Amino acid sequence: MSNLTTLNKATQLAYLDNNATTQVDAKVLEQMLPYLSEFYGNPSSIHQFGEQVGKAIEHARQQVQALIGASYSSEVIFTSCATEASATAIMSAIEAFPNRKEIITSVIEHPATLELCQNLERKGYTVHWIKVDARGRLDMEAYKQALSSEVAVASFMWANNETGSLFPIRGMAELAKQHGILFHTDAVQVAGKLPIQVADSGIDLLSISGHKFHAPKGVGALYLRRGAKFRPLLRGGHQERGRRAGTENSSGIVGLGKAAELAMQSIEQDSARIKMMRDRLEMGLLARIPHCFVTGDPRHRVPNTSNIAFEFVEGESILLMLDQHGIAASSGSACTSGSLEPSHVMRAMDIPYTAAHGAIRFSLSRFTSEEMIDQVLAVLPGIVEKLRMLSPYWDTVSNQPAEQSFSPVYA
């Protein structure tokens, strides 16, 4: 018997790590299963086995088109993940504009963008790293100053994966357009959570990932505005209209399409309910635990994400003890877990070292229940109190008045 099964019998599981990955919706799985069994043809084949799969892929393309508000379904390119989609977008832009040797991005990007741009910088490209303030808000003046005809691509995440804070992507895209710069956004943490309408924006390229909104892992998509210059990253086949070689992940694409459809059906209701639970979680923890505060921009963020910094404790220790109580959360991006250093996002916002180490991300989904929130509120205060008793820093502050660095704006 697995540890998870044993734990499930002892206590309710509270999964609050949905920015890392989400539960596959049962309706999504139901839609996928036939394409793992009876509909197994290669969609590129001209016989009926392939044709029926090809039609399912085109239907999924239309479903994703609707989710992101694109003008044409042909603007949707299926990929293996958002990392591939973002790499395709950035590499395509610098290949399409070989004489432009500059890139603009932020210091708090997901590693998929961050490390790719660092690699390009080592190869001689100039990367303008735009900083953020203590709330994770972009330095827009620095962004405007970096724009020029020497820039091939500007690539920015729409919502930060750790704090949920939103960048003003639509306005940024319009500014880039004035200089003929291709604009790409990593919309992984926005898709399925907030409405997207790319058709009337200046966005040229947009990346999404299925497993962040209840589709399976291993499938994503890249939006490519019709008429935008493009060079494929993967070559060697005619799939995806010659823009992404490799036999399509048929079942995954069908699942992505269904997940997009389901998200569209309930995005407003889900977002409102999820935000209420997130706010109750935050207010409850801030009221129960001294010396903690919410990081990021509380007024401009996705509804499902809360990142709370607990001072004078180690985030990893909090996570391990939460896990013993059946609660899953995160200390940052799952793609950078294992590092003992505070995340680059916390460091970029100048979060004090004693607080950055204790930053915990709670990320909700439509499958999150009120009981899960109650479970965290019941368990976490005791965990933090216990860990602080072991902290060498705690004695110096435990007798001081507790101050919250963040005043909730829920009223």
Image: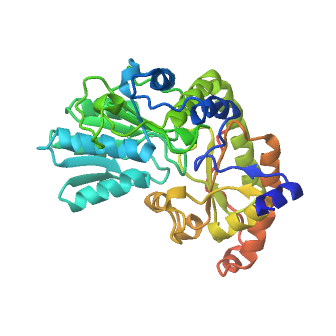
Where residue 169 sits, quadrant-wise, is top left
Q: Residue at x 59, y 65 (%)?
A: 355
Q: How many marks?
A: 0
Q: Is residue 141 in sight in this rendering?
A: no
Compared with 44, 381 (above or below) is below
- Of 178 and 316, the residue lying toward us: 316
* Residue farthest to the right, as pictured: 10
Please state if 177 lies on the left or on the right of 111 as rendered.
left
- In percent of width and height, residue 75 lies at 36, 25
- In percent of width and height, residue 395 lies at 71, 79
* Residue farthest to the bottom, as pictured: 392
Please state if 280 lies on the left or on the right of 38 as rendered.
right
Where residue 285 sits, quadrant-wise, is bottom right
Q: Residue at x 34, y 35 (%)?
A: 172
* Residue farthest to the top, as pictured: 71
Please state if 341 lies on the left or on the right of 360 as rendered.
left
Please state if 51 lies on the left or on the right of 33 as rendered.
left
Q: Is residue 283 in sight in this rendering?
A: yes
- Of 84 and 101, the residue lying toward us: 84
- In percent of width and height, residue 232 lies at 27, 39
* Residue farthest to the front, as pictured: 47
Compared with 24, 126 (above or below) is below
Quadrant of the frame with the N terminus: bottom right
Compared with 92, 319 (above or below) is below
Quadrant of the frame with the C terminus: top right
Compared with 264, 187 (above or below) is below
Q: How is the image coloured?
A: rainbow
Q: Residue at x 20, y 54 (%)?
A: 126
- Of 255 and 163, the residue lying toward us: 255
- In percent of width and height, residue 56 lies at 51, 23
- Of 218 and 165, the residue lying toward us: 218
